[in-house]
Image (spheres, rainbow, N blue to C red):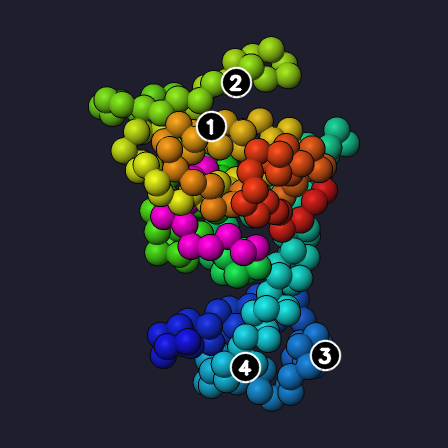
């Protein structure tokens, strides 16, 4: 790890601790983390940065669990199983915390492009692309004006309605590695269309990730399509 990576890790640990502190006293935070309350106070207030070993532990061990719990607390599921996740996808700062946990917890490898489908996947894809320092692209259900060439993916949904996603052809180059992400996966139809777009671009799949899996069908469908890692942060 070079100096800049160490600093980034230390700051990420502080972000995780600040998020945990929102719903805890310092004594409770000490219990959660196993770190002394006085040290935690200094980290949270920005007076001192945690050492790299402590920072790594906070990010690896607490990051994923705490974020998954926070995500669960923000999701509302109605009586028919539909998910309201606006508290998550509208919160770019929360997604900025999620991004390193996803990037380090799922073996995706650094992609050239993070690809999603408009609309609700965009903020997650932006956070991940920013974390990796790579490009972000999103396919839309309509053609963007003034773009001449598109990659198109069309599928007839279970409902019988045909759905087409369009991505400007220049968004992905042949041979690039693409991480396919979305806020939510249920049937897996949207992810399948995004994977069709990656294939049409002659690009490689780095992985498939959804913040929330509504049931297992979508994740299983994605696993059938790719040998790359497939995962979600939580399942409802
Ligand atoms: O696995 P699936 O069954 O395909 O469902 C998941 C998709 O459904 C939602 O998008 P929606 O089509 O509602 O569009 P939106 O993002 O504009 O809300 C969600 O953001 C995913 O893209
Ligand atoms: N918000 C949502 N909840 C569950 N399934 C969905 N499929 C598409 N949008 C959905």
Give the mark toward the camera: 3 or 2. Answer: 2
Mark closer to the observer (1, 3): 1
Q: Earlier in the sequence, mark 3 or mark 4?
A: 3
N-terminal of the pair, mark 2 or mark 1, is 2
In-front residue for pair 149/28: 149
Boundaries of the magenta span: 106-116
User: Residue 10 colored magenta?
Assistant: no
**Category of crowding for the residue at label 3, using alpha-carbon neighbours closer than 10 angstroms: few (below 14), some (14–19), many (at least 20):** few
Q: Position of residue 191 (x, y in %)?
A: 54, 33
Local secondary structure at mark 4: helix
Q: Position of residue 202 (x, y in %)?
A: 37, 33
Left or right: residue 194 compared with residue 73:
left
Q: Are marks 2 and 4 in contact (CB under 8 Å)?
A: no
* Secondary structure beneath label 2: strand
- Is residue 113 covered in magenta? yes
As measured in the structure, the alpha-carbon distance from the residue carrying label 1 to the one carrying label 4 is: 42 Å
Q: Residue at x 36, y 25 (%)?
A: 151
**Circle 2 residue:** 155
Q: Is residue 1 above or below residue 88?
A: below
Residue drawn at (27%, 23%) of the image: 149
CA distance for labels 3 and 4: 18 Å
Q: Which residue is mark 3?
A: 31
> Mark 2–mark 1 contact, CB under 8 Å?
yes
């Amino acid at each position: 790890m070079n100096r800049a990576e160490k600093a980034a890790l230390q700051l990420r640990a502080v972000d995780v601790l600040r998020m945990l502190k929102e719903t805890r006293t310092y004594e409770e935070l000490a219990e959660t983390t196993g770190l002394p309350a006085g040290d935690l106070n200094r980290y949270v207030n920005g007076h001192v940065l945690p050492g790299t070993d402590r920072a790594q532990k906070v990010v690896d061990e607490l990051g994923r669990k705490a974020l998954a719990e926070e995500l669960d607390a923000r999701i509302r599921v109605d009586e028919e199983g539909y998910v309201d996740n606006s508290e998550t996808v509208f919160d770019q700062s929360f997604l900025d915390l999620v991004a390193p946990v996803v990037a380090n917890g799922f073996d995706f490898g650094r992609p050239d492009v993070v690809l999603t489908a408009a609309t609700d996947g965009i903020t997650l894809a932006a956070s991940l692309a920013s974390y990796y320092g790579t490009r972000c692209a999103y396919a839309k259900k309509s053609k963007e004006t003034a773009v001449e060439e598109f990659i198109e993916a069309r599928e007839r949904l279970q409902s019988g309605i045909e759905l087409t996603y369009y991505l400007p052809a220049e968004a992905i180059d042949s041979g690039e590695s693409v991480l396919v992400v979305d806020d939510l996966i249920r049937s897996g139809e949207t992810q399948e269309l995004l994977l069709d777009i990656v294939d049409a671009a002659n690009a490689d799949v780095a992985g498939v990730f959804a913040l929330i899996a509504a049931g297992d069908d979508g994740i299983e469908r994605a696993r059938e399509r790719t040998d790359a890692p497939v995962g979600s942060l939580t399942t409802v």
